[in-house]
Image (cartoon, rainbow, N blue to C red):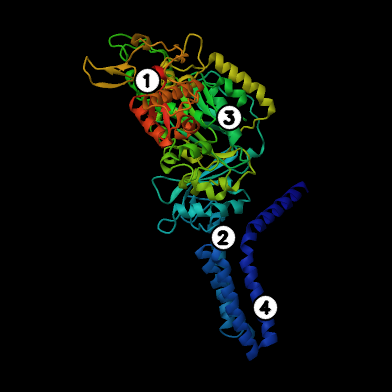
Amino acid sequence: MEAQLRGGSDAGGVSRYLLHRAKPHLPPWLGWAGTGAAGALGSWRWEASAGAGVGLTASSFILTAVTWWAGKSTGKQRRLHSAVTVALGSGWLTAACLAGPTASPVGDIYLMGGPALALSWNARIVLRHNTDNSGKGGSSDGGLLEKVGLARAQIGAAKVEPNRVTAPLAVVGGEQTNDDVAKALVRIASALDLPASAVRYTPDPGSSRRGELVIVPEDMLAEVVEWEGPSNLGGSIADPLVIGRYDDGAPLLVWLPGDPDAGRNSTHLLIAGGTGSGKGDAALNLQTEILSRRDVIVWFSDPKAFQDFAPLRAGLDWGVEGGTDTEVMVEAVKAAIPDRTRWLGAHGYRQWVPAAALPQNDPAHSCQAGRACGCAGLPFLVAWFEEAANTLRNLGDDAFTGIAQEARSAGISLIVSLQRPSYDQMSTSTRASLPSVIALGCDARDEGFVLPDEVLAAGAHPGAWGNRRPGYCYIVSPGIPEDRYPSPGRTLRFTHNAVPVMEQLAAWAQANGATADPVTAGAATTVAGRAYTGRTSADSKPTPQPTRLRALDGEDTMEPDTGYRDGLLVDPEDAGIDPDTELPDLEEGDDAPIFGQDTGRKPSPEEARRLLDNALAEFEREGRMVVGPKDFMDWCDQHSLSRSWVSKRLKDAALEGRLEATSAAGRWRIVPALAAA
């Protein structure tokens, strides 16, 4: 009995298995049987009816046309096969209804043609479910690519990672290209019921029809992660900066210095995002990472008076709040570039590397021939301009162009943050020189300003976020694999709980971070005078590198002195310059009137020149190191001098070395009195 039950059970299992395997192949045969039954019923109703013949014929044409139209979103083969099947079936049904299903040759066609047509659909089903992807007729996409208009495209073996699937894709040669795949990404996301940003495509640089399709099924960015502290306190600025995570959970990394061993270039960075996109948190993530490193100093400009960055201000080497102070900082960065590149070249560095920040004791690369110089190292410099649209309005859209084009070789990274880097705010030359970008949510019309076209084509879409996904971003930067460019990430969020940690970080930077080297501090002091203080230790004060005139080898020819002799840095004390000397004040009884004093008469040309010198000295004491004719309007009225005279006199002062022209028309940088002497 047990054996019989077991045998019956086995027989039932076999039957169920066969039925399960046969189910996908039954619909064509059911259609054949149903068409025959419909023909017999129609013959009983309409046999030899002329009116029925007209109606059935018209219905046959309409049904075939509708089938062809409905199949336009499928592959060409399926569309043609479906239309032919409907045309043959409806044609036979019309003949059967009018002549009878058993009339010759109607009955013969039914018995021979019907099974053949059903078998053709069975063959198609078998080929479609072929699991051998190496064959030309197989596919493992379950018909997905055919649905989205990429029929006959082939998907290779997929690489499955936690929350990330990567599969090679090849479209039909001569019929489709990588552009067709890019256009189909939205439809693929729709078919998979995923957001558009979850599907990306990275073309193969060596092929127009091959690439990698990346699908991220779960949005891990929906969970907010708060900032708890820097990732690598005391590390080098050459190590990666961690500012968040990607949608598959991988860390969101940025590098600023280059790495000759890895073949990575140094970079400048643009942070762009609309109001409410989380640009402030992105900047805080990056700045806290920078300040936590041992071999970097930061010059920071924020026209919003450090509203977001106040807890970190103590850790900066130099911080200003916009206006003229920012104008001075821009000029100081420009002045530091040649001095820093000269130092790096003299010590054998083609670009900044962490070893450059250490004391220099290698006799082979010395600024004093024949022996190790023992020079202090040169920390990496980050020049950061927050809310840069304000600065660009004041200084012109080319304000950062020179820095962006020249600073990387000097171990300087320029960071520019603004809402909309459009061409009416930032020059195309500047934008082209900012190779890296953190692109947060923006207006869809602005996507082309922040991301390269190829990244947008690969599936990046920051315009879809706007201000509804704070912190969501794309990053394009050296060191990041190109297939990561269209992958969305999210920065860490800063709350009020982060303020004490940021203050502790600023205190750590004061005590343990790098201080300005003599070369960089000297360049800044030469430009900014007392406006630059620097975050220096007690035994490391900024040493000015004066720009004064000197005779060459006893000749009368004069040239600017940058503090170098035959390419070697000379201690300013050896040149008889005391950097701590206070500027002399005018004493009562001097021939020149005190600046601002109304003399009640028009001064002579000589007196007017001396008045202007006193005015420049007063501006210098106040830290206003960039001036123009508009700064002298009240002074002109007091001393009965025209503004045109002041403009001419400013040009004369420039020839005398007391002023230097800036990149802004009509603006002059005051050369500190010690340097101009």
Q: Closer to us: mark 1 or mark 3?
A: 1
Q: Closer to us: mark 1 or mark 2?
A: 1
Within the image, what quadrant is residue 312 found in? top right
Residue pointed to by mark 4: 38
Residue in front for this viewpoint, 617 or 382: 617
The Cα atoms of the two marked residues, 2 and 3, are separated by: 54 Å
In the image, residue 404 lies at what x, y percent? 42, 34
Q: Closer to us: mark 2 or mark 3?
A: 3
Residue pointed to by mark 1: 676
Residue in front for this viewpoint, 329 or 225: 329
Earlier-in-chain disc, 1 versus 2: 2
Residue at left offset 52%, top offset 27%: 300
The Cα atoms of the two marked residues, 3 and 4, are separated by: 72 Å
Q: Quadrant of the C terminus?
A: top left
Earlier-in-chain disc, 4 versus 1: 4
Residue pointed to by mark 2: 125
Residue in front for this viewpoint, 302 or 471: 302
Q: Residues within 10 Å of mark 3 (few under 14, many from 20)?
A: many
Residue type at numbered disc 3: Asn
Q: Dots 2 and 3: beta carbons under 8 Å?
A: no
Report if residue 458 is visible in the image: no
